[in-house]
Amino acid sequence: MAYSTVLVGTDGSSSSFKAVSAAASLAGATGARLVLACAYVPMRESERAAAADRLGDLAYKVSGSTPADDALRVAREHAVAAGATDVVLAAEQGDAVDVLVSLAERHRADLLVVGNRGLNSLAGRLLGSVPSNVSHRAGCDVLIVRTTPDGR
């Protein structure tokens, strides 16, 4: 099957960058566009102010979508190193599952890629995991990449 648009979610973690690299390798090999997606929830004003006081000149790092934008910049480096040539960045406020499914629809993704983190954890079984929920809600193919050695 050929994919023209591959969307991959990242949260800036090293395990999510494994999913990014896998998606980028596939996108690069097939000439597909790669959409790097990151969902974020803004800090409450009291938390942001406390963090800004401690961070001083670096306070901008905890404001708005900046942490998500930082994660996407690093993810782009991983994607390019893995062979992706057409890369789009998308940071959006909201729940990870909602954001990934929505972005996949808007970008007309043929394939949505996520890491397996949370699938076999107690929290994932009780609360629902991003990979599990995405696989049930996405309107396209879903690839769950094994990003953790023990599957958690």
Image (cartoon, rainbow, N blue to C red):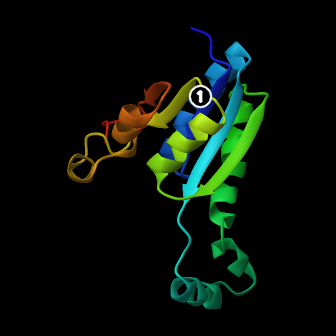
At 58% from the left and 83% from the top, the residue drawn is 48
At 20% from the left and 52% from the top, the residue drawn is 126
* Relative vertical location of residue 18 with respect to residue 57 in this rendering, above or below: above
* Relative vertical location of residue 47 with respect to residue 66 in this rendering, above or below: below
Side of 111 relative to 132 (left or right): right
Q: Which residue is mark 1?
A: 23
Residue 115 at what x, y percent from top left? 45, 37
Residue 56 at what x, y percent from top left? 70, 87
Which amino acid does the dot numbered 1 rest on? Ala
Front position in the image: 114 or 102: 102
Q: Which image quadrant for residue 57? A: bottom right
Residue 62 at what x, y percent from top left? 63, 74
Front position in the image: 62 or 101: 101
Residue 105 appears anywhere in the view: yes
Residue closest to the far right? 85
* Relative vertical location of residue 88 with respect to residue 33 in this rendering, above or below: below
Residue 151 at what x, y percent from top left? 32, 36
Q: Quadrant of the N terminus?
A: top right
The 10 Å Cα crowd at callout 1, few under 14, some 14 to 19, many 20 or more, is: many
Side of 72 relative to 18 (left or right): right
At 53% from the left and 31% from the top, the residue drawn is 112
At 68% from the left and 48% from the top, the residue drawn is 90
Q: Quadrant of the C terminus?
A: top left
Residue 116 appears anywhere in the view: no
